[in-house]
Structure formats: structure tokens, C-alpha cells
Image: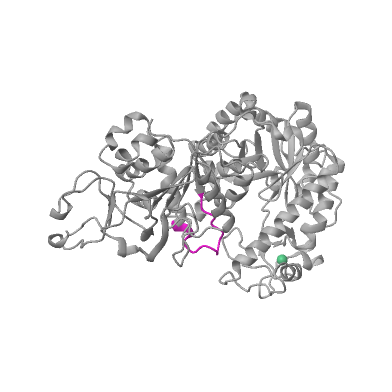
Amino acid sequence: MPGRWRKPFTVFQTNLQEIDATMDVEAALDVIEDHGADTWLVNAGGIVAFHPTDLPFQTRNPFLADRPSGDLLGDAVTAAERRGVRVIARLDLSKVAAAVAAEHPGWLFRSAAGEPQVYNALYSTCPAGEYYQRRALEILDEILDRYAVGGFFVNWFNFNERDYSEVVHGVCHCASCAERFAEFSNGRALPDTHETTDLPLWLRYTAATLEELGRKYTDHVASRDRDLAFVLTKGAPMLYSEGNNAFRHMPGKELWPHATAETVSAHVSAGTRGPLVLNAVAHVDSTYRMGAEQPEHVAQHLIQAIARGGNPSTYILGAPGRLPMASVSLARTVTRFHRERHDLYAALRPAATIALVRPGGERGRHPGRLDALEEFRGLYRALQERHLPFDVVGLGDLAAMDAAGRLDRYRLVALPDVGPLGTDTAEALDAFVERGGNLLTTGGGGTTPEGGVALAASPAARRIGAPVSGKEVWSTYATLDEQPHAHEGRFVGSVVPVYGSSARYVWKPGCDKAGSVLAQAPWGPPELSHGHVPGGDPAVASIHYGSGVSAMIPWTIGRTYREFAKTEIREHLLRVVEPLADAGSARHCPSRSNSFWGATMTDTWCT
Ligand SMILES: [Zn+2]
């Protein structure tokens, strides 16, 4: 990764339409600089070339004919260079014009039925095919030979599984895919649809293909020795992430407002990835590109990005000023703030002592993925609202982070209901606790479908029977407080609902149990809605393992908090979290004096 791109930078992307070929580049740069950006991400080639390309398989923008120089990219680079603004050239290789498609049918996406994918008269291409694999290098070379660009960004760097209208075209069956997939999978045929057990394998094939392609592009431009950035969503030394509220993915669904902070934190925590560009979108969705996003939303993506160590980028449609730009008004404030403090941001390092593990979530692999995500989000909100600093850590990154010594700065690793763990991950977490770290698992974190417990550090030996969920947990509760009058039907202190799923465990000898789960009792009619008694199941159990403590909440407290949003549930969770994180201050301890976490653990954990 070249030196200058290692330092903080600020980006403004003008995502141009064909009609912008005649745009005033000086006026655009005025807006870009005023916004606080030192880098301009502008269209160069791919679907439409904004320069007079001589490559027969590139399509010159016909509106370039109306530009005196006939070369928008050239004018942009020259003008930007005069001002010390760097230009990143934007390519989109995902589609080609009909004439190119007719000449090169082998470059195209093919459905299982052999059909191409056509969208607004453009033909979708395949990353496994020759266009992406070889001809793209000629596109890069032509631009590098002609222009002093500072780098490249390739848009839609993905397999064309679905189009802009959300029509699912599925698995590509082009000849290149058939050959490469067979090689990747020891001779298997491509899956016909997404509804197949081979989907995870195919997804790994697509990821591997894109990673390899990203490296190919990066190595290719590196040979120029020109301090070039290569920005991709995957497989590149500089990663791109989009901050949007994409309406089309969630009509009727709840917005998760922390998505950007979560993504950037997981990226930075891993410690091995390069700089990240967080591109905040100025419109509500690609289906409403003229619909300006709420300015606070745009700015929030950027604030979350810079707070977590990302580089801010603002993305507008078209030449600046051609469309209303009120949506980026606050993004400008954030971008300028970052630019004026580049020295500070260059020195920014995560210092949180809590790691919150984000579920793996590989599509098609983990049937409980959305439930795991909700569990994660419940914990996320609780920590955020209590202002306990935490990093997000990818489940798949834990083993490598442990090997690199990057887990040791955490006091607590919180592992939400992520399901089974890989051997490497379980060993990493065990070693972390053994060295003195604390671990909290919630729900079925670390438990196999058969009821085995992957973590040697766990207070649980094995699960008893299957977890219960849905209606089976209705009218179940948990309490951390002593309930001496429960048998008379009288309860004191805090009693919170158990929602989502819950399981019973065989606990290891020597484990400490606190509170209790009040097993299900009738909830209707009201006359009969009683009979809850504390059973033998604790609300939380913990055990000393090596020099650390490993604790488990055997039900999905995160999902419960997400569902009911009651602060009492959050407080229940934080009563467990804070001692483990060494985060509770002395003032919290007396209030816990009636609970296990107060009475038993105060001496050793509260200072
Ligand atoms: Zn293909």
C-alpha cells in the first residue's frame, strides 16, 4: 500500500450520468474542495468511457462529442492536479453494450437456462470471464498511460446474481464459471439455483474468484510504481464500504442505525486490513436517486466512519449542482472536521477494552443468522447506551487476531448467540480466557446443534435436550435477585422476560450460579397465570478458567432487549457485563449487594 494513501484522506464522488460529459470541471472542483475533500472519485470507463478510449470493447460516451477537448477525464485530472486534488478513476466492468456483447458472448453472465442478463440494453458480464480477467488490465493500462490518476475504484465488483430491479438471476453458468467452479470444488457441477445445499460452496467460489481478481488488479497497477490506490469492496489493499439506508432492502423493516460503525469497527479491529473508504450516499436509494437523503443520515454514516478509523467519502449523483445538494450539507461539516484534523486521525487507534463479536453470517450457511444478528444488536445497543467503549470483532477474525496478539488488549470478549464455533475460534477464545481475559456468551453461543459445548472455558458441560424457542419460551422470566417468596407467588427486585430461545445445561463442578430462570407458567387466562418458581437453572453461570472468568447467560438476552426495548432488560445484562469488563464503578456495587454479582463477586471484581 503506497505511503500517501496510508494517511487520512477525504473523498467526494461524483457518480456521473452520460449527460455530464460536458460538465465544468473547475466548478466541480470548487464544490469538492469546499466540501473538504482532497480526493475526487470520478467516472472513467467500463459501462461508459468518459475519455476518448481506443479500446474496441469500450464504449465512448457519445456526449463527449459536445465537449471541446472531447475528454472529460483528461480535463478533470489536469484541473485537479493543479489544485493538488487526487483523482480516483471509477470503472464499472459489470456490464457492456450490446455490440460488445455480440462480439464477445463468452464474457457474459449466463443463467442456468443459458440466458444472458440484459438490463436497460446493457449485458451483464461475469468476473470469471475474460473481460474482467484480462481485458480489464488493458482498460487500466490505457488510463494509466494517458492520465496522472491517483488510483482506481471498480464499482459493482461482484457476481451479477441480481439486477437493479432486484430480479434474481442466480448462479452464473458461463463456460468460465463451469470450468473454474469444477476446479474449485473437485469436479462438482454449478448449482442450478440459489435453493441448494451447494450455495455455501458456490459463495466461497465467488469470494475466492473476486479476491484473486482483486489481487491481480492490485499487482498489475503496483508494477507502475506510481503510488496508486486500488479500491474494491473485497480483495484490495484499500476497502470500500457504502453507508446507505437502502430502502429497497428493507421496506417495512427497522433501520439499524449503527451499520456503518459496526462495519468500520470490525474492519479496523482485525488489524490486518488496509485503509477503508466509507462512501456515504446522498440519496435515499438507488431506486430513488433524485430523492435526497436526510442530511443527518448522510452525516451520521461519516461520523461513525471517522470515529472508528475510516476515511470519509460523500457520493452524489451527477455533476455538482445539477441536482439539489442539500442532503450533503452536514456531510460537508464532517468532512471538513476530518480534513482539519488529519494528524489526529492518522494517530487514531482503537482503545476499547470490550470486544463484541459479530456473527459470521455467511449467507446460506447459518440458518439462525438473523436471530444471531438480533442477539448481537441487543448487546450492541446496551453497550452503546451505557457508553461502554467497545470494538466490533468479526467472528471469523478471532483466531487470526488471537494469533497476532490482538485479543489481549480486551478485558472482555462478548460472544452473542453465534451458534457453533470453528475449532480455531474455540481454541483462540479458550486461550484468551486462560491468559486472564473474561468471556461472556449469550444464548447458544459456542454450542453445537447436538448440544456439545465447544469452549473448554465454558461453565457449561453440555446442553440438556434441545433449546426451546418461540411460544415455548413465552411467559418465561429471569431474575438476578433472590426470590425468597416465590413459592407464595410474590416476587421482588427485577424480573425480566426471556424471549427468543433458552436452553438448560449441565453445569461444571465449581461453577458459580447467579439468579434463576423462572420456567414457563400459564399466561392465560389471567386467573390461571401464576405458578412461576425458580428452578435449578441460573440466570447466569460463570467459572474461573486459567486466569480469567467465563460466564454464560443461557438465553437470548440481546434479542429480548431488542424486542421489548425495556431498560430493565438492559440493566440485567449490564449487571453481568460490567464486572466482567471491569467497567462497573464502585457506585454500582452497593446496588448489587442482594445479587450474586454484588455479593459474591464484589470482593474480587469491584474496585
Ligand atoms: Zn460466470
Q: Quadrant of the N terminus?
A: top right
The answer to whether residue 291 is seen in the rendering is no
Count of numbered badges drawn on the protein: 0
In this rendering, does residue 342 appear at all? yes
Q: Which residues are magenta?
A: 358-371
Query: Is residue 464 or residue 170 the one in the foreground?
Result: 464
Q: Quadrant of the C terminus?
A: top left
What is the image's colouring? one colour
Residue 5: name its quadrant: top right
84 magenta-colored: no
> Horizontal placement of 528 versus 81: left or right?
left
Which residue is at a point 60% across and 58% down the rendered structure image?
164
Please name the residue shown 67% across and 66% down the image.
117
Task: Decide: is 271 above or below 188.
Answer: above
Q: Give the overall secondary structure of the magenta segment.
A: loop
Q: Residue at x 68, y 67 (%)?
A: 172
Residue 360 included in the magenta stretch of the image: yes
What residue is rendered at 68% in x and 33% in y? 28
Quadrant hosting residue 169: bottom right
Residue occupying the far front of the picture: 509
Q: Position of residue 178 (x, y in %)?
A: 73, 71
Give the quarter of the image for residue 585.
Answer: top left
- Write down which quadrant ligand 1 falls in: bottom right
Looking at the picture, how far across and down is residue 195, in whole percent?
A: 55, 71
Camera-side residue of 471 and 607: 607
Q: Measured from the top left, where is residue 605 in percent x and y?
A: 39, 36
